[in-house]
Structures are given as C-alpha cells and as structure tokens.
Amino acid sequence: MSLLTRTRATKPTTPGVLPGAAALLLALRAGGSAGLPGPHPVLAIGVRLGAQHRRQWAAEDRSRRPGASDGELAATKRMIDQLNGLRAGCVDEIDTWCDRALPAGPAEAPLHTETVGSVIDRLAIAVVRAEHLMTGRAAAQLGELAHAYSVLVADLAAGRRRVPSWRTLKAYGTAR
C-alpha cells in the first residue's frame, strides 16, 4: 500500500450515501457500466477500478512467464507502474467524493484505519482474486471484506466512525 498524506476538504450540509456492498460488488465485477444499479459516482469509479485490477493481474502474469526477455519484463514493469498510477487515481477519486459528500462524523467517533477508497480498492483486488483463483478461501475473503465494507458504511451513516481524508503519495513513475 502506498504512503498517504492528509488533505482538507469542505463537507456539505447534506450527507451523501455510499452504495451498498451488493451494488459495489456488481460494479467491481462489471466490464462496463451496463447493468449498474444506478448512476452513483462511486459505482462508476468502481467499474474502472475493477478493470484496472484485471489489467494489472494479466500484466503480473505476463511478468512471470518463463522465458520472458529482459526487455519484455521491463516493458511489463512499466505497464504495471502505469496501471498502479491509474488505480491510485481511482482511489483518490473515491476519497475526494467522500470528502465532499459524506458528513465528517463526530470528532469523538473512532477513526477508521483506511479511507473508503482504500477499502474499495481492497475489495476490487479481492473480486479479481476470487475470479481468477476460484477457491473457497478467496471467496470467503471477498465475503468478509464485503461484510466489513457494509459495517463501515452503516457506522459512517450513524456517526459511529469517521474516515481519514488522505491521498496517495506514491507517484508510480510520475512526478507529484
């Protein structure tokens, strides 16, 4: 996971609502926006995030191919860095939406250890892992992460938890 830095954002007076786990999982699994349950911005970003993880999985598989030349490995590593940059951008987009749309939560509410974007990123990784590995263990991990996301969404809505307002620091080959 990349290092993160704190940013500030103004919260609106009307609280936003995060999509539920079922809708989010559909978005992370989608190859495109067709069939998405509504136009929620986080779902649209989730479609892109899931696609980034699929492309990265494929690139990592190529990097492990026996007999790959040094040039192929270098090109694949550059592609993985580019994909990581795009993935980090999706995470930052989700976190920016959360900064603007979700209530800050009471100062006394415990701080969650990750941003909402980071949680959704881990869910996207778990979706792709479950698709490729097709094991009970991968499916169980995905189920646990989806449940944890649901609990976080409920806690945020009830003011029982708050999330950090961080942004990615690692640039993945580009200056930030």
Image (spheres, helix red, strand yellow):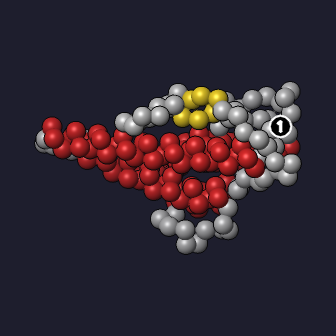
Left or right? Give the position of 71 relative to 81: left
Q: Residues within 10 Å of mark 1 (few under 14, many from 20)?
A: some
Name the image quarter holding residue 34. bottom right
Q: Position of residue 97 (x, y in %)?
A: 67, 49
Q: What residue is pinned by disc 1?
A: 105
Left or right? Give the position of 168 relative to 149: left
- Taking the image as drawn, is residue 67 in sight? yes
Residue at the location (56% across, 44% down)? 91
- Taking the image as drawn, is residue 152 in sight? no
Q: Amino acid at mark 1?
A: Gly
Q: Residue furthest front?
A: 175
Left or right? Give the position of 45 relative to 65: right
* Numbered marks: total: 1
Left or right? Give the position of 24 relative to 58: right
Name the image quarter holding residue 175. top left
- Observer-nearest residue: 65 or 91? 91
Question: Compared with residue 172, is residue 93 higher up or lower down, i.e. above or below?
Answer: below
Residue at the location (51% across, 52% down)? 49
Q: Position of residue 161 (x, y in %)?
A: 79, 35
Residue at the location (57% across, 29% down)? 4
Q: Position of residue 11 (x, y in %)?
A: 79, 43
Residue at the location (59% across, 60% down)? 44
- Observer-nearest residue: 140 or 49? 49
Q: Position of residue 36 (x, y in %)?
A: 61, 68
